[in-house]
Amino acid sequence: MLTLVGRTLGRITMLTTALAGLLVAFQVAIVAIAASLEGDEGFTRLAGLAPAFLQQVLGPALTSFAGLTSLGFYEPLIVLLVVEFAIYLATEPAGDVESGLVDLVLARPLPRHYVVTRSLLVMTAAAGALPGVMALGLWASLAWLAPAGAAWPEPRVVGLLVAHLMAVAWCFGGAGLAAAAWARRRGAAQAAIGVTAVAMYLLDFVGDAWPDAGWLAWLSPFHAFHGAQILSESTHAARDLSVLFGLGALGVALAYWKFQRRDV
Amino acid sequence: MIAAIRTSELTKYYGRVIGVEGLSLDVAQGEVFGFLGANGAGKTTTIRMLLDLLRPTSGAASILGFDCHRQGLQARRLVGYLPAEMPMYPELSGASYLAFLSRLGPPPSRAHLDRLLRRFDVSDLDLRRPMRDYSHGMKRKLGLIQALMTEPRVLILDEPTSGLDPLMIEAFGETIDELAQSGRTTVMLSSHVLSEVERVCSRIGLIRTGRLVAVQTLSELRAVTPRRLTVTFSRPVQAEVPSLPGWTVVARDPQCWVIDVCGPIGAFVTTLAGLPVSDISLAPFALEDAILRLFGEAPSC
């Protein structure tokens, strides 16, 4: 198992490092922007400029130094980037089938589920590591750039944001793993779940922004990850995390069930 | 003795398409078995079911007594496999690739691996290069080495010499000969290169549209496959061509007879005494003719 995990890690090291660097750079940039707005009522003016729907989505991010510096953990592009990366990693079994590498690996005395377990471990590690690296980047940026007297985000709140980002990435990673257990082409599995993730994000956004379609938001896993509510501590973290990890676990279970039975 | 490879009514349907149907086959331990058939006949499907990569629709397969599905781990521990298309990690060097596969087990002995590298003329420099730079033949050599390096009891090779140069084909032949002599390893090879099959195999199985058409030893095939005999005379002769069972006169000319013959030709040669024979030529056994005959596309004896 370690050999398979090591091989995959070897293949994704550069990509993961580049992505982690991008996420840390975003944290540095957002802290630098927040530092420039701190004082002179910069946040009040920023909140006044933002349209109502943006204020609703971003919540306290626009009104305080602590809020803005936490934005990275729930900013749509960052969230989707982390989610899509988890999906990419989770769909490796389909890539192995497509390239024929599964023939070489499973012709050796290895249980079939190793291929799924390998991708599950790598996806879980990445889903955990990227938000973790972002948190480290945030604290390092704060120590470097935060003006004296600025109120830093609460570690507990940052911890919750990190946990939710991990959970939503793992949730879609689980779905990616399930799709990969069915698919013969990695691109097909990745596109199906990748597009679904974006659609789910939009569904949640529409449901939240349009009261008449509020029920739509309940169909989306992103409904269990509202950064603005986490910042204002008006969310039920245990329930939301359970939903996200539960959905991910369902995908993982389906992946094991199907891959064990399929022709590779 | 337990068969090295056994399939019982092995069947695989891809939806409504027949992959393999009712295939029952025994390959004895120590045998070198050629598995032949046209593209899409079901050779690779059968091989992939033996490795539990495909699940049969019905029937069963076993390797040295271990069911390929229910006891797949034990079965695959005994197998070395070369797929028809050699998959690779392009960023890995040849050495890293072999090391990766060695770690997946069973571990090869260093001495045996070195011997294989020498035999297939793979240098340290080759092993240090990334696989993306390898030629098709080089990838094939590495594929053969990875299949052979664990000294498997059963070796399953799908198109083993595709892309190899004549020297490497000879090295491959020598390797299979050694394995056959040792009697320890059973070889099942699928190939379109009939000369290679004829060179290394003791028995062949023919598969056509998913069904096993024939299983025969090469000596049985030799005995029943007609060969072309041409007798040339220095001057016209009026004698009749002797009639022998299973013989077919293809052409009769006063100065040349062309006959498809089966079995020994000694009796025929004696009938030529007194005739002005200037030349006799007998075409060697050709596996291709034998296979065409088995497929019903050529006359038999």
Image (tube, coloured by chain):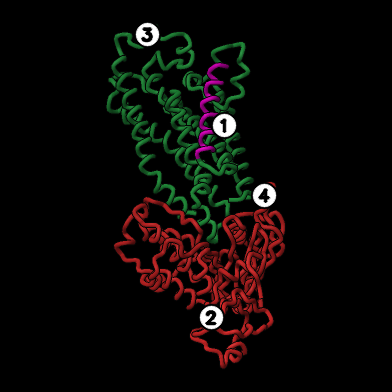
CA–CA distance in space, label 3 to label 2: 114 Å
Chain shown in red: B
Q: Which residues are magenta?
A: A187-207
At horizontal 50% and vertical 58% (from top left) the residue drawn is B84
Q: Amino acid at mark 4?
A: Val
> Where, quadrant-wise, is the N terminus of chain B in this rendering?
bottom right
Task: Mark 1: give few (<14), some (14-19) or many (20+) Cα within 10 Å.
Answer: many
Comparing B211 with A113, the one in front is: B211
Q: Amino acid at mark 2?
A: Gln
Q: Secondary structure at mark 1?
A: helix
Give above or below for A167 relative to B268.
above
User: Is there one chain holding both mark 3 and mark 1?
Assistant: yes
User: Mark 3 sits on what residue?
Assistant: A44
Among numbered discs 3 and 1, the one appearing first in the sequence: 3
Tag 4 near tag 1, CB within 8 Å: no
Q: Gap in Å between the C-alphas at discs 3 and 4? A: 69 Å
Give the image quarter of residue A216: top right
Residue type beneath disc 1: Leu
Residue B274, image x and y in percent? Answer: 56, 93
Residue at point 45%, 13% (across, down): A54
Any part of residue A124 in sight: no
- Judging depth in this view, the residue of A132 and A96 nearest the camera is A96
- Name the residue: 36% across, 29% down: A138
Q: Which residue is mark 4?
A: B17
> Label 4 vs label 1: CA separation?
41 Å
Quadrant of image for the C terminus of chain B: bottom right
Q: Which residue is mark 1?
A: A244
Q: Main secondary structure of the magenta part?
A: helix
Would you say the residues marked 3 and 4 are in contact, meaning their CB atoms lie under 8 Å apart?
no
Chain of the residue under the numbered disc 1 shown in the image: A
**Residue for badge 2:** B255
Other-residue count near label 2 (Cα within 10 Å), few / some / many at <14 / 14–19 / ≥20: some
